[in-house]
Image (spheres, grey):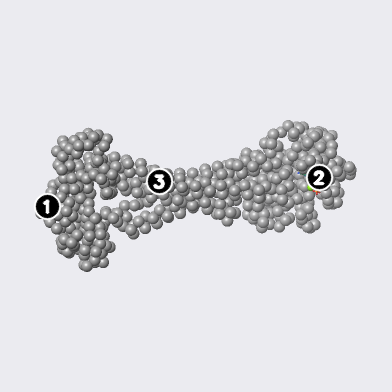
């Protein structure tokens, strides 16, 4: 029975292709936007949580207050080597190391560019940073303890993406006017900003930038089996005592990677929800457009409805017929929307890849596709409620007389 | 004589447009027995179609009774009326009234779908009906691809889909030329002769009237004459 109604509805939609297509326009724009947003969002979230997970749960990060997750801003407070000393003395801290970020003037082959230069500790305190940052060196070698005025370059420098000429191992590169020797090239990180960084020994950075003891970030690894939240509390307490600040007024952040991931997830979900909300407006328009089409359809097919009633269709039958038609109108929009959305997401992924963002992979989980189709069907049905009701209530005599 | 299957007693139908009341039927009474062939004649506006609507359970009277197999149709719910139409009455309209998006075959199947008849049975029945009206070859065609006469033959096949005892035809040849009209009329007469259907037909055709067992002539919503 329902099967026959479905067939009937699909037939009507097929025969009236142009009408069907125009009606679906708003629906598929909305669905396409939602599918692409979710699939890209899902991909981004996966990539980032994968990276966080790779770091492990026993890592802690300390930064000046007013910075968030690697974003280096104009923080009012500073953290220094002295803070690092304090942290290293906290129990259950296995190792800790700090880094210095500086915007630097690079000169190569008579060309000038500005990028971030990162001062990396070359003693054993650098190990924790190496582990967290999961650096991989594709050419040359990493910085070692005896290195001074040596530099490891990001992959975009090696690919001649920053300077006209490729920066190779053993080349000379000027940073802030000082001559450095290139000893290694970093592999691709996947973010174009990160991929144009240069890495120099922390001690050298202190000389070049005249920063005797500032640090921008301190990375900490706890000993095996230690309770990370407890270590965080200890670090906070020691730092408060040392910096002479009250609890609640800390001018520094102590965060675990887990916390950062959670914060990130919350912000991310919020942003995504807002975007999807905006896309939903298009769906609303789509719903109204389906409703409008269905009303027109009821009007145009008044006679047809009269005939169906004459040959035995009950009000309920007419109602179901129109609801199904309306539902499929929505779902047809959904199908096209999903396809366009997937294409769009892939396109964004490709464009991002071309910009050097390789970590972004659009995800199309089955529940996204099925959910979207069901959703668009439901929108169609809901939009069809009122028109279908009107159709079902038509008096057979009046409907048959309709010209 | 046995009991009539359709009985109209003092039936009034008054249409109201704004404040104007239009009495289309004014106390009409009529009995129809099983197996009869009845022709309804009369000038335009005399109430023929209104009468057919009452008999066909498409509408209920403003006043008076319409009994179908002894039941007063005014006591039926909308759904009962639909059920009754679907099971007991076959309609043939002047304007054919096929569903334009469906093929001839599907149009013939439609009344059976509303009765929940399984596909295989529907298919067999629709095929045999289409071959009866001589349109087997056109079963995959949509109404728009058929001539008027062909469409009306499909409509006749459709009216027979649920094996109704009563066939109502309101000017079935009104939109056809005389030659195809005759062909359609012959088909309807055949239904009466061979399948013993009760047929009520609105017509201006004297030949059909000649064939009819009874002719009811309407004027101003009343039967003013009865031939035979
Ligand atoms: N739904 C309606 N609303 C208002 N008036 C109507 C309605 N249906 C019919 N009438 C009026 O009732 C009267 C009888 O109409 P009916 O359609 O029964 O005539 P008819 O005999 O079938 O005419 P024709 O030969 O032109 O088909 C006419 O005056 C018509 O205008
Ligand atoms: Mg009429």
In the figure, is residue A62 to the left or right of B79? left
Picture disc at residue A272: 3
Question: Relative to residue B190, is residue A30 drawn left or right?
Answer: left
In this rendering, which labeled residue sits more in front, label 1 or label 2? 1
Nearest the viewer among A356 and B35 is A356
Sequence-earlier tag: 3 or 1: 1
Give residue B156's position: percent from left, percent from top.
72, 49
Q: Position of residue B199 (x, y in %)?
A: 78, 44
Query: Is residue B4 in sight in this rendering?
Result: no
The local crowd at label 1, few if under 14, some if 14 to 19, many if 20 or more residues have their Cα within 10 Å, is few
Chain ID of residue with mark 3: A
* Contact between labelled residues 2 and 1, with CB atoms less than 8 Å apart: no
Label 2 resides on the chain identified as B
Q: Position of residue A314 (x, y in %)?
A: 65, 39
Q: Are marks 3 and 1 on the same chain?
A: yes
Separation of disc 3 and disc 2 at Cα? 66 Å
Whether residue A163 is visible to the viewer of this picture, yes or no, is yes
Question: Label 1, on which residue?
Answer: A145
Contact between marks 3 and 2 (CB within 8 A): the answer is no
Question: Pointer 2: what residue?
Answer: B48
> On the picture, is A355 further left or further right than B190?
left
Q: Crowdedness of circle 3 by 10 Å Cα count: few (<14), some, many (20+)?
A: some
Indicate if the residue with disc 1 has its beta carbon within 8 Å of ligand 1. Answer: no
State whether label 2 is within 8 Å of ligand 1.
yes
């Amino acid at each position: 029975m329902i099967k026959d109604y479905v067939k009937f509805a699909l037939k009507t939609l097929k025969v009236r292709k142009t009408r069907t297509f125009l009606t679906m326009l708003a629906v598929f724009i909305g669905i396409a936007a939602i599918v692409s947003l979710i699939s890209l969002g899902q991909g981004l979230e996966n990539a980032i949580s994968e990276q966080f997970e790779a770091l492990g749960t026993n890592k802690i990060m300390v930064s000046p207050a007013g910075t968030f997750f690697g974003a280096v801003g104009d923080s009012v407070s500073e953290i220094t080597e002295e803070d690092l000393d304090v942290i290293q003395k906290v129990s259950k801290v296995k190792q800790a190391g700090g880094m210095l970020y500086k915007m630097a003037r690079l000169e190569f082959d008579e060309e000038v560019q500005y990028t971030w230069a990162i001062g990396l500790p070359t003693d054993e305190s650098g190990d924790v940073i190496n582990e967290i940052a999961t650096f991989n060196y594709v050419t040359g070698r990493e910085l070692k303890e005896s290195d001074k005025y040596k530099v490891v370059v990001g992959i975009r420098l090696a690919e001649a993406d920053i300077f006209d000429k490729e920066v190779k191992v053993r080349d000379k590169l000027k940073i802030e006017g000082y001559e450095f020797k290139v000893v290694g090239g970093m592999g691709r990180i996947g973010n174009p900003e990160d991929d144009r960084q240069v890495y120099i020994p922390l001690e050298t950075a202190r000389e070049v930038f005249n920063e005797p003891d500032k640090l921008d970030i301190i990375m900490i690894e706890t000993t095996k089996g230690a309770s990370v939240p407890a270590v965080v509390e200890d670090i906070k307490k020691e730092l408060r005592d040392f910096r002479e600040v009250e609890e609640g007024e800390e001018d520094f952040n102590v965060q675990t990677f887990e916390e950062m991931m959670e914060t990130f997830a919350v912000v991310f979900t919020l942003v995504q929800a807002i975007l999807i909300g905006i896309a939903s407006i298009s769906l609303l328009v789509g719903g109204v457009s389906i409703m409008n089409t269905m009303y027109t359809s009821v009007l145009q097919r008044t006679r047809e409805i009269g005939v169906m009633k004459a040959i035995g269709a009950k009000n309920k039958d007419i109602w179901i017929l129109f609801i199904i038609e309306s539902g499929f109108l929505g779902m047809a929009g959904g199908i096209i929307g999903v396809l366009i959305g997937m294409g769009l997401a892939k396109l964004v992924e490709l464009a991002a890849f071309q910009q050097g963002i390789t970590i972004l992979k659009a995800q199309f989980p089955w529940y996204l596709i099925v959910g979207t189709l069901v959703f668009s069907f439901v929108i169609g049905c809901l939009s069809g409620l009122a028109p279908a009701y009107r159709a079902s209530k038509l008096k057979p005599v009046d409907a048959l007389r309709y010209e | 004589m046995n009991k009539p299957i359709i009985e109209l007693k003092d039936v009034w139908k008054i249409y109201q447009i704004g404040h104007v009341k239009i009495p289309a039927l004014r106390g009409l009474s009529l009995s129809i027995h099983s197996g009869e062939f009845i022709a309804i004649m009369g000038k335009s506006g005399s109430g023929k179609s209104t009468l057919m609507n009452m008999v066909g359970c498409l509408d209920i009277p403003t006043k008076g009774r319409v009994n179908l197999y002894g039941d007063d149709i005014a006591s039926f719910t909308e759904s009962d009326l639909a059920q009754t139409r679907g099971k007991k009455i076959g309609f043939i309209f002047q304007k054919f009234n096929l569903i334009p998006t469906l093929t001839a075959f599907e149009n013939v199947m439609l009344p059976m779908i509303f009765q929940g008849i399984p596909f295989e049975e529907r298919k067999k029945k629709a095929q045999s009906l289409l071959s009866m009206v001589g349109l087997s070859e056109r079963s995959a065609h949509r109404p728009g691809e058929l001539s008027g006469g062909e469409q009306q033959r499909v409509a006749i096949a459709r009216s027979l889909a649920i094996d109704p005892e009563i066939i109502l035809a309101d000017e079935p040849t009104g939109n056809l030329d005389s030659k195809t009209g005759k062909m359609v009329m012959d088909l309807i007469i055949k239904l009466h002769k061979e399948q013993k259907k009760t047929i009520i037909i609105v017509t201006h055709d004297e030949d059909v009237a000649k064939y009819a067992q009874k002719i009811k002539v309407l004027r101003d919503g009343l039967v003013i004459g009865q031939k035979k």
